[in-house]
Image (cartoon, grey):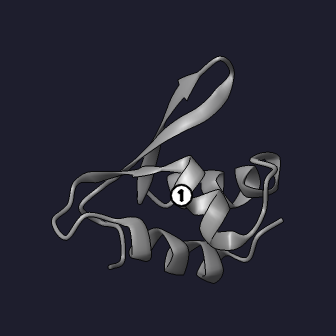
Amino acid sequence: MVNEQDLIAAIRLHAPSHLPGQVSIDGLLSELGINDESLLTNTLKSLQDKGYLQFGYGNGKIKRISLNTSFPL
């Protein structure tokens, strides 16, 4: 599992300058140096529960992360 603060920092690097906006899951995996999306799942769900983001799915995997205006940039 990825630390929540590390994930937020990685998202910040890939986030658009204005929210709401989208972030690529592939960019986050690369930034964090991991190749298994499942390592992010619990942490992403925790951020979703806080209202920071939402997911877009494709083929049963997270393909897109939409950041809400409440995301801590």
Q: Observer-nearest residue: 55 or 34?
A: 34
Q: Is residue 61 above or below residue 38?
A: above
Q: Is residue 54 left or right of residue 18?
A: right
**Residue 18 drawn at (x, y percent):** 15, 65
Q: Provide the secondary structure element on which disc 1 rests.
A: helix
Residue at the image point whose x is 63% and y is 51% from the top? 45
Q: Residues within 10 Å of mark 1 (few under 14, many from 20)?
A: some
Examine the rendering and report whether any part of residue 49 can be seen: no
Residue at the image point whose x is 75% and y is 54% from the top? 42
**Residue 33 drawn at (x, y percent):** 74, 69
* Image quarter of the N terminus: bottom right
Q: Is residue 27 above or below residue 60?
A: below
**Residue 36 drawn at (x, y percent):** 81, 50
Give the residue number, with chain letter if any, for mark 1: 27
Residue at the image point whose x is 67% and y is 30% from the top? 61
Q: Is residue 66 above or below residue 58?
A: below
Q: Is residue 67 left or right of residue 18?
A: right
Specify the farthest residue to the top. 59
Specify the quadrant of the image occupied by residue 13. bottom left
Instruction: Name the amino acid, label 1.
Output: Gly
